[in-house]
Amino acid sequence: MNVADIMTVKPVTIDQNRPLREALEAMEKVGCHHLPVTGYDGHLVGILSDRDCRTALNSPYIMRENWQDEDLVNTLLVRAVMTPAPIVVEPDEPVAEAARLMLKNHISSLPVMRSETMVGIITTSDILIAFMQMSERGYYSSKPDSK
């Protein structure tokens, strides 16, 4: 199974010069925890996670009702909070390689790039869902008999 088989195609993105409020609202609306960040030319320049947002807001929560500093979410720009130059993966890479990269680098998402174009995003949730579906279909059975 390749990354393209389980990735989210055309993920919601955010421009690096938008306020953090817009990123938080986009995450809430879509129900995601990661936003690829684009530059002025639309190319990928970073990734913003809910963890990045919580750290910037010095809060264990990112829900709207828990924003302690309204001025901060309105003035802090995405580029100040994002992780620049994220690790990426190609769509034809095996899912196991994406999982290996995530584990090795302690991250939970990878933008999926075909050359200079972002074509999707893969997260640990995508990998776990694929694993569960494969398990339900019987791809993984119990231990073989050892006689």
Image (tube, grey):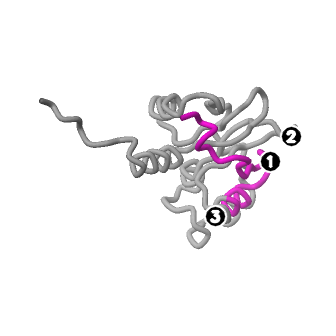
- Residue denoted by label 3: 28
CA–CA distance in space, label 3 to label 1: 19 Å
- Residue denoted by label 2: 40
Q: Quadrant of the N terminus?
A: top right
For the residue marked with disc 3, what is the amino acid? Answer: Glu
Image point (23%, 38%), residue name: 143
> Horizontal and vertical percent for residue 4?
64, 38
- Residue denoted by label 1: 17
CA–CA distance in space, label 2 to label 3: 24 Å
Q: Residues within 10 Å of mark 1 (few under 14, many from 20)?
A: some
Image point (66%, 61%), residue name: 30
Dot 3: element:
helix
Find out whether the residues at labels 1 and 2 contact each other: C-beta distance under 8 Å.
Answer: yes
Q: Is residue 142 left or right of residue 42?
A: left
* Range shown magenta: 1-26
Image point (59%, 36%), residue name: 3
Going from the N terminus, do you reach mark 3 or mark 1 first? 1
Dot 2: element:
loop
> Horizontal and vertical percent for residue 102?
50, 34
The residue closer to the viewer here, 135 or 15, is 135
